[in-house]
Amino acid sequence: MAATEHRLSLDAEKQSLLNLHTENHFTAGEVVRDIIIGVSDGLTVPFALAAGLSGTNATSAIVLTAGIAEVAAGAISMGLGDYLAAKSEADHYARELKREQEEIIAVPETEAAEVAEILAEYGIEAHEYGPVVNALRKNPQAWLDFMMKFELGLEKPDPRRALHSAMTIASAYVIGGLVPLAPYIFIPKASEAVLFSVVVTMLALLLFGYAKGHFTGNKPFRSALETALIGAIASAAAFGMAKAFNP
């Protein structure tokens, strides 16, 4: 009775500590990742395409038409690609889950030995991990979750992740892609519109790079400069090649 009261008191004490301690972890990593991928490519690829076409003395109407077509195709391609990748990840998890379930039923002693081996890798002694192994064997679902995470290194994917990720990337690509094309809507001459496109897109790349650095824990100013540099190199290369082939 005294031991039970002590355990309950200890649990209450731990819970009190947990309630007092708040950890400020960034938990929107997957969404931010999708936005970064979409906006980064959306700003860079149409920007380079528009700059390249401007170097061929094309009209703003032609640049805008080609740019919008690229943004549409790029958004669909990137969104679909990410959707298929996420679906493949979910299918892989389901296959491994079924296989692990069958192994726990068919060869429980072997699976228990694997649990012991995993815990031993963390420096836990046999007399310490023994009760943990026994406790997991009494709870098949917890045992299965443990093997999936610590043996195979797989996290259960969100069933809605594939569609949400695809939509986020595609939308971010469209938003990013419209930035370098906007000047061509208002300026008929592409050789003039490209100058405004460069200014607007470089500012957008700097702001985006700064935000990306802030959310990912990197140095914001360094991230801003790196992002802008990549966009500048891509557009300069496209413009230079267009000028070289169409002097």
Image (cartoon, grey):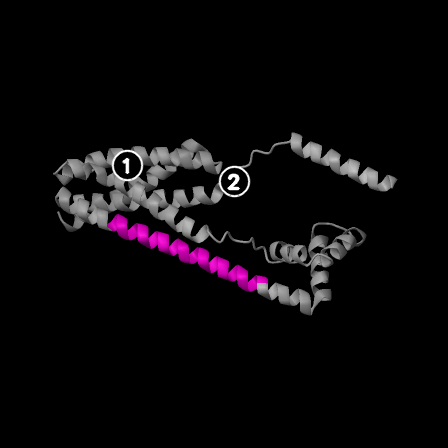
Packing grade of label 1 (10 A; few <14, some 14-19, many >=20) is: many
Q: Is residue 225 magenta?
A: no
Q: Residue at x 73, y 65 (%)?
A: 109
Q: Could you tell me residue 24's position as x and y percent? A: 56, 33
Look at 12% across and 38% down and name the residue there: 188
**Mark nearer the viewer, 2 or 1:** 2
Image coords of residue 181 (percent x, y): 22, 41
Q: Name the residue beneath numbered marker 1.
A: 201
In the picture provided, is 1 more to the left or to the right than 99? right
Residue 95 in which image quadrant: bottom right
Residue 104: mark: none
- Which quadrant is home to the N terminus? top right
User: Along the polypeptide, which appears first: circle 2 or circle 1?
Assistant: 2
The answer to whether residue 95 is visible is yes
Q: Position of residue 141 (x, y in %)?
A: 65, 57
**Residue, x 46% and y 51% (percent of image)?**
160
Q: Please, which residue is most extreme toward the front here?
A: 1
Q: Is residue 236 left or right of residue 151?
A: left
**Residue found at x 58% / y 61%:** 97
Query: Which numbered disc covers residue 27?
Result: 2
Q: Quadrant of residue 200?
A: top left
Q: Which region is colored magenta?
A: 70-97
